[in-house]
Every structure is written in C-alpha cells, then in structure tokens.
C-alpha cells in the first residue's frame, strides 16, 4: 500500500537514480585510485634511490636497504638514468614480475580494465610498474609491487565510496521527498480529496474548491477545477429547473390538447354557419387551432426521454420519396418533387421515422415558398448521403444560426423550431446525421447521412449441364 503512493515512489526512484550515478562515478574513481597508488610508490621509490646516490661507495647496508624497500612497499626499486646507467635497491633475490604496467603513456580504458582485474582477482601477483621521474621525464623509475596490499586498499576505498553513496542518496532522496511532498503531493491530495467530496454532493456550494492563489501548474489546476465545479453546479441547477418545467409542460400540453380538440369540434360547426362573416373567419380559426395542436404534439415528442424506439428494415429510398407528395396533401401544382435516386439504392432504417424526417423537410420547404424539391442519393465510403434540394428563398440568418435549437430555429413566424430538432434526433438515433449544406437566395440544401447496409449474399441455384 505504501509503494502505491506517489511520494513513496518518488523516494525509491530518487535513491535508485543517485545510486546509479554513484556507480557511474565509482568505476573511474577506482581506476584513478589505482593510478594514484602506483604514482605514490614511484615517488617513494625515487626518494629511496636518492639515498643510494648520496652514498660515497654507491652501495647501502643490507639493513638500510630493507628499511627503504619496506618504506616504499616494494620488492625492488630501480632508477634508469638518462645516460643508460641503472641504480637499484633490491633485497638480493627479487621475484620475476607477472604483469608490467607502464605509466609513461597512461590509458584510461586499460586502467579501468586493470582495476577490475585487481579487484576481482585472486592470489598475489607481482606488478612491475614503470613511470617517469618527477625531476626529469627522460629518466624512469621502476618498482616491483605485491598486488595483495593494492587489492586490500582498493576494496577499502570502494567500501568508503559505497557508504558515502548511500548517505548521499538518502540525504538527496529525503530532500527531494520533502520538496515534492510540499510542492506537489500535498496539493494533489487536496485536489483529489476535493474532487471526491464534490462528487458526493455536487449541488453543495461548500464542497467547491477554494483556489490557493499559486501561479504554477497546481494553481492553474485549482482554478480550472473551481471553474469546472461552478459550471457543473450551474448545469445541474438548470437541468433540475428544465426537468420541473418539462413535467409542468407535459401536464399542460395534455390538458391543452383536450381543450383544443373541443375547440376544433366547435369550429367545424362554425364552418357550416349561415352567417358569411362566421364562415369567413372559421378557416383561419381552424388553422390557428391546428398550429396549436401541432405545437403541443412537437413539444411532447421533444420532451420524451431518450431516442425513439426503432424498427429497422431494408427498403428502397425511391419508394419512400414517392410517398412524400401524397403525405403533404397539396394540389398538383403545390410542390413538384423530382427524384434522381437509383431505384436499386436501399437503406436499413426505421421506415416510418425516416419518412417523418423527409416529410418534415418537404413541409418546411413548402412553408418557405419552394415550388420544386429535388432528391438525390449516393453511397460512398460506407455511408449513404441523401440530399434534399429546394428552390425556395433560403433561410434567414437568424434561422441558420439557431437551426437545430428548439424554440429558436424556426424560419417562419409562429413556428416552434422543434421539427428540425426532432428530425436530427431521429437521424442520430439511426447512427446518422442531419446537416445544412447550404442556404442561398436560390434554394436550400439539407443532407441526411445513414450507415450503408451490409451487402447481402446472393445465392445461386446450381446449373445442371445436359
């Protein structure tokens, strides 16, 4: 559970990365320690040779030689002069070297390789080390060293480096942990805690986050979360008001339709009245009542929750378009419908609902003043697009801006704007779309899109050969 928290992961990762960095530093450090060890032994050997040079006889007592070699930590010390002569301090029977190491031309890669061979090696090899003199680079100092003391000191050095690395990594991790805890983890916990608290009761204003005033990314997140919570509260409040209003409108519509039905019956009787004035006014009264009934019907349809139930079937688009004219109930010269849809083009949809959409578009075209309606359709990229083109005067700017908004998108006075909103809802329930392509002074174009039906397998009867 502890490692699931962000702060614990940051702590572990910080320690890991610091240790990796220390390992990368450890390799050259050990190689440099080995080089320094050799250089110190060469310098001590050169100093021991000076005692031999100061001797009048050119020789030293056996006991003094052993002391000097012990001080250097070498088996043998030799000094190669410029003139080719050699001064040597030895214990009488120096061993044969196993490895020769030349420091006159140092190589870091060879030094690293030799360091690992020493660290991981076994036994006590004899190392012959050559290096330039500290006073004259043309002169060379040579020492014979045992590898075991060098290995021991290198392991001590590596242990100290490891201990120091652990201390540095822990201190660094603690500082990073505290910094991130203060700068990032605590504010994130505050934000997530507020989100969980707000989710339990979004309508409670006291559960909204209060921005801390920080100017970094955390401050931006707090301010944006506050704006989001305010927007959600407003949307929930508006939704509650709309739900209450919808319930009230549904009840009012039900009663209003009953009242209008009674008024319609009474108005039908007025049409047969003997008074000319009454007969003249009755048709307009009937139209007003019909519009009111249609408004109530559309409002009830739009207030219904969710998409309408669909009964899909496969049918020809041409046959459906041919039913639009009779459905409008107009005279022969009221609207001319021209269909340029291939007869074999079929769709898979709810026939009644798609007919309702097409009839609504045709009726809107007639009410806008159109006299000709052209329907085209084509299948492309798995989609069937149906274009409805009229020759009306086009939609006014206000209607285009609010085309699919209920109660705002009507193009005629007294309209509710619910027809197109319901039509788009029906198309989207089919997985398609209803969109305005263009609207100019020469006409308006609407496009219906539907998913193309899958091709049906054609079964063929076997042919018998004579």
Image (cartoon, rainbow, N blue to C red):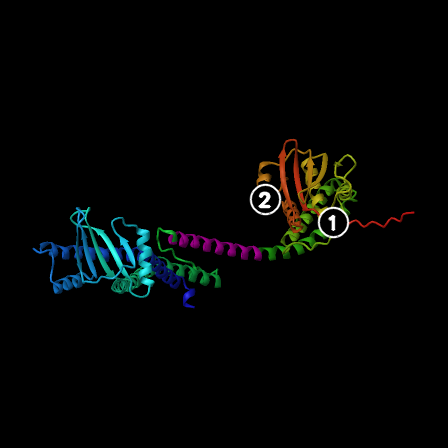
The quarter holding residue 120 reads bottom left
Q: Sequence-wise, which precedes: disc 2 or disc 1?
A: 1
Instruction: Please give the label number shown on residue 215.
Output: none
Is 220 in the magenta? yes
Image label count: 2
**Magenta stretch, residue numbers:** 218-244
Query: SS of the residue at dot 1?
Result: helix
Which residue was labeled with disc 1? 351
**Towards the viewer: 92 or 337:** 92
Residue 11 percent location from the top left of the image? 36, 62
Percent x, y for residue 164?
A: 27, 62
Pointer 1: residues within 10 angstroms few (<14), some, or many (20+)? some
Look at the numbered discs 2 and 1 and tell me whether their residues touch, using CB distance below 8 Å.
Answer: no
Residue placed under numbered mark 2 in the picture: 408
2 or 1: mark nearer the eye = 1
Please tell me which residue is depicted at 63% across the width and 35% down the height of the picture.
439
Confirm whether the magenta stretch covers residue 199: no
Q: Position of residue 436 (x, y in %)?
A: 63, 40
């Amino acid at each position: 559970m502890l490692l699931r928290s962000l702060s614990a992961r940051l702590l572990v990762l910080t320690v890991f990365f610091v240790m990796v960095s220390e390992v990368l530093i450890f390799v050259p450090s050990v190689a440099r320690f080995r080089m320094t060890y050799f250089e110190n032994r060469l310098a001590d050997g050169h100093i021991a040779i000076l005692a031999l040079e100061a001797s009048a006889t050119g020789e030293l007592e056996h006991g003094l030689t052993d002391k000097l070699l012990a001080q250097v930590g070498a088996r043998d010390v030799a000094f190669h002069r410029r003139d080719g002569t050699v001064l040597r301090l030895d214990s009488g029977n120096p061993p044969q070297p196993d490895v020769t190491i030349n420091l006159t031309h140092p190589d870091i890669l060879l030094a690293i390789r030799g360091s690992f061979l020493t660290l991981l090696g076994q036994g006590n090899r004899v190392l012959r080390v050559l290096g330039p003199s500290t006073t004259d680079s043309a002169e060379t100092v040579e020492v014979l060293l045992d590898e075991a003391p060098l290995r021991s000191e290198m392991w001590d050095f590596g242990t100290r480096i490891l201990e120091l690395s652990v201390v540095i990594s822990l201190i660094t991790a603690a500082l990073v942990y505290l910094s991130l805890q203060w700068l990032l983890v605590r504010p994130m916990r505050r934000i997530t805690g507020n989100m969980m608290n707000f989710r339990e009761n979004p309508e409670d204003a006291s559960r909204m986050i209060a921005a801390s005033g920080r100017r970094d990314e955390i401050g931006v997140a707090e301010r944006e979360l506050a704006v989001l919570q305010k927007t959600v509260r407003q949307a929930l409040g508006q939704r509650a008001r709309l739900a209450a209003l919808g319930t009230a409108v549904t009840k009012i519509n039900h009663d209003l339709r009953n009242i209008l039905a009674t008024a319609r019956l009474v108005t039908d009787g007025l049409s047969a009245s003997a008074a000319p004035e009454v007969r003249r006014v009755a048709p307009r009264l009937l139209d007003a009542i019909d519009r009111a009934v249609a408004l109530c019907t559309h409002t009830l349809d739009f207030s219904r929750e969710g998409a309408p139930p669909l009964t899909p079937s496969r049918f020809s688009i041409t046959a459906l378009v041919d039913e639009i004219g009779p459905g409008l109930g107009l005279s022969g010269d009221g609207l001319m419908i021209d269909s340029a849809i291939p007869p074999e083009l079929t769709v898979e949809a709810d026939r009644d609902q798609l007919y309702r959409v097409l009839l609504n578009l045709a009726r809107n075209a007639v009410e806008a003043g159109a006299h000709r309606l052209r329907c085209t359709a084509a299948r492309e990229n798995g989609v069937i697009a149906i274009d409805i083109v009229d020759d009306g005067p086009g939609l006014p700017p206000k209607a285009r801006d609010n085309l699919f908004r209920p109660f705002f998108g009507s193009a005629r006075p007294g309209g509710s704007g619910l027809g197109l909103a319901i039509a788009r809802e029906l198309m989207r329930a089919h997985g398609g779309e209803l969109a305005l392509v263009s609207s100019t002074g020469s006409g308006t174009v609407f496009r219906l899109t539907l998913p193309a039906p899958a091709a049906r397998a054609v079964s063929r009867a076997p042919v018998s050969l004579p």
